[in-house]
Amino acid sequence: MRLDRLEALIGSDNSALLKTKTILVCGLGGVGSYCAEALARSGLCGLVLADCDVVDPTNANRQLIALDSTIGQMKTDVMRERIADIDPQVVVTTFTERISPDNLERLFAGNPDFVVDAIDDVEAKTALIAYAVARGVPIVSAMGFANKLHPEKIQISTLDKTTVCPLARIVRMKLRDQGLAARVPVVYSTEAPIASRREGIKLGSSAFVPAAAGLFAAAYVINAFIQMEAIRS
């Protein structure tokens, strides 16, 4: 009963396929928290949740797991408990270290079927993308969604085709410096960043743009599995 509505949409074969898949979600902020929940509601076998931060009061305007009752708790713990309440059958593993080139092998130890990159640290982001590409693990990477107000300007493309987004430009350059083609699937916005109107706060954010980006990323993963199955069939 829990997944009847989804199965009515994608069919029993695809529903059974999703029950064999494990996704690694890196970053549980405004983008990653919404992505992780959407994936948890899609009947997957498992989720690996990676984030080293605790819930902070400043997260409350945009992060799904940021509640008055969760302030100070590890984001991975809060998300794990939330997913258990959504669907106890989803196997959730947590990784509470800051992602770096030094721990990527352990991060991928469970052999995820897909990776969602929703982290902000450029060096970690670049290393994560490069590692996933080298291992042949499909990945979709979220670019920058701060200082934006229009979720309708979010698109899915490949990194080499992005425009406007400053973060995408930096990541593209760093990957090319490593000799990697920038054809990684990304979720990004074509909206020009809005200058902050608050002194001391460089990155403004809304409740709806990062959330929409997270749902775009989750949709990309689920549809990719379905499309791959259709090609094999």
Image (cartoon, rainbow, N blue to C red):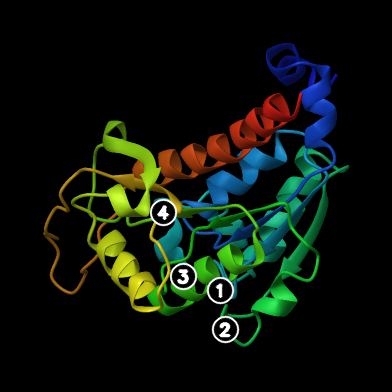
The alpha-carbon separation of the residues under discs 3 and 1 comes to 16 Å
Label 2, residues with CA under 10 Å away: few <14, some 14-19, many ≥20: some
**Of residues 199 and 189, the one drawn nearer to the viewer in this rendering:** 189
Residue at the spot of label 2: 101
The alpha-carbon separation of the residues under discs 1 and 2 comes to 18 Å
The alpha-carbon separation of the residues under discs 4 and 2 comes to 21 Å
Dots 4, 2 in contact, CB < 8 A: no
Dots 2, 3 in contact, CB < 8 A: no
Dots 4, 1 in contact, CB < 8 A: no
Query: x, y (%) of residue 92?
Result: 80, 56
The alpha-carbon separation of the residues under discs 4 and 1 comes to 30 Å
Q: Secondary structure at mark 1?
A: loop
Q: Earlier in the sequence, mark 3 or mark 1?
A: 1
Report whether 157 appears left or right of 64.
left
Q: Amino acid at mark 4?
A: Arg
Q: Secondary structure at mark 4?
A: loop
Residue at the spot of label 4: 183
Query: x, y (%) of residue 157?
Result: 37, 42
Label 1, residues with CA under 10 Å away: few <14, some 14-19, many ≥20: some
Q: Amino acid at mark 1?
A: Asp
Choose mark 4 or mark 2, whichever is in front.
4
Q: Earlier in the sequence, mark 4 or mark 3?
A: 3
Q: Amino acid at mark 2?
A: Pro
Choose mark 3 or mark 1, whichever is in front.
3
